[in-house]
Image (cartoon, rainbow, N blue to C red):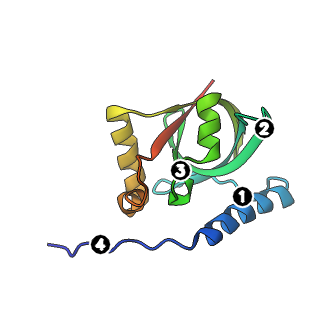
Amino acid sequence: MSAPRSQPRLPPRWFIRAAWYTHRGVYRLTRGRLGLWRPKPDGWGALRLTTTGRRSGQPRRVMVGYFEDGPDLVTMAMNGWGEGEPAWWLNLQSNPDAQVELADGTRAVTARAAHGEERERLWARWGEIDEDLDAYAARRSGETAVVILEPR
C-alpha cells in the first residue's frame, strides 16, 4: 500500500500571473516563433486562444495548455487553480466561436463544455498528463470545466 500523496504546492498567485504575462510576452516579442508547441504523446501543448470579450466585443487572447482528442482540442478552465472561472471561458460561454493559433497554423473553433462520460474520459486523459490533477482541482470550490474546441 502506497503512502497518501501530500497536497501539491502551488506557487504564489503573483508568480502564476507573472508566468502568464511572460509567456504572452515571449510569443509577442518573437512574433509567434516561440511560445506555442504541439503536445507530446505524454504531455500537453500550448496554443493561443482568441475569444470575443463578452462585455467589450473586442478580441481577447490567452495562452492555454491543451491536448488533442481526434480533431478536437481539449483544455481546462482552471484559472491557474484559483477560484472563479477564467475570463476566456466566460467569454466562450457568451460566444463559443473562437480562433486558435497552434504551432502549425490557425483554425476556427467552436467551444463547448464536456459532460458526463465524455468529461470523465477527458479528465482521466489529463490525469495521465498531470498526476496531481485531482489534488489541484480539489483546491477549487466548484468543478473545473473541461473545454472542447471543435473545428468549425
**Which residue is at the front of the view, 78 or 132?**
78
Q: Nearer the viewer, mark 3 or mark 2?
A: 3
- Dot 1 amino acid type: Gly
Residue furthest to the left in view is 1
Q: First in sequence: mark 1 or mark 4?
A: 4
> Counting other residues with Cα less than 10 Å from the Cα at mark 3, is it few (<14), some (14-19), or many (20 or more)?
some
The answer to whether residue 137 is left or right of residue 71 is left
Q: Which residue carries the number 2 mark?
A: 59
Q: Residues within 10 Å of mark 4 (few under 14, many from 20)?
A: few
Given the image, on which type of amino acid does mark 4 rest?
Answer: Arg
Does 31 sit above or below residue 94? Answer: below
Which residue does the numbered mark 4 point to in the structure image?
5
Q: Could you give the CA–CA distance between mark 3 and mark 2, rounded to whole angstroms?
A: 21 Å
**Relative image position of residue 78 (x, y in whole percent):** 52, 52
- The residue that mark 3 highlights is 84
Residue 144 seen in the figure: yes
Label 1 Cα neighbours within 10 Å, binned few <14 / some 14-19 / many ≥20: many
Circle number at residue 35: 1
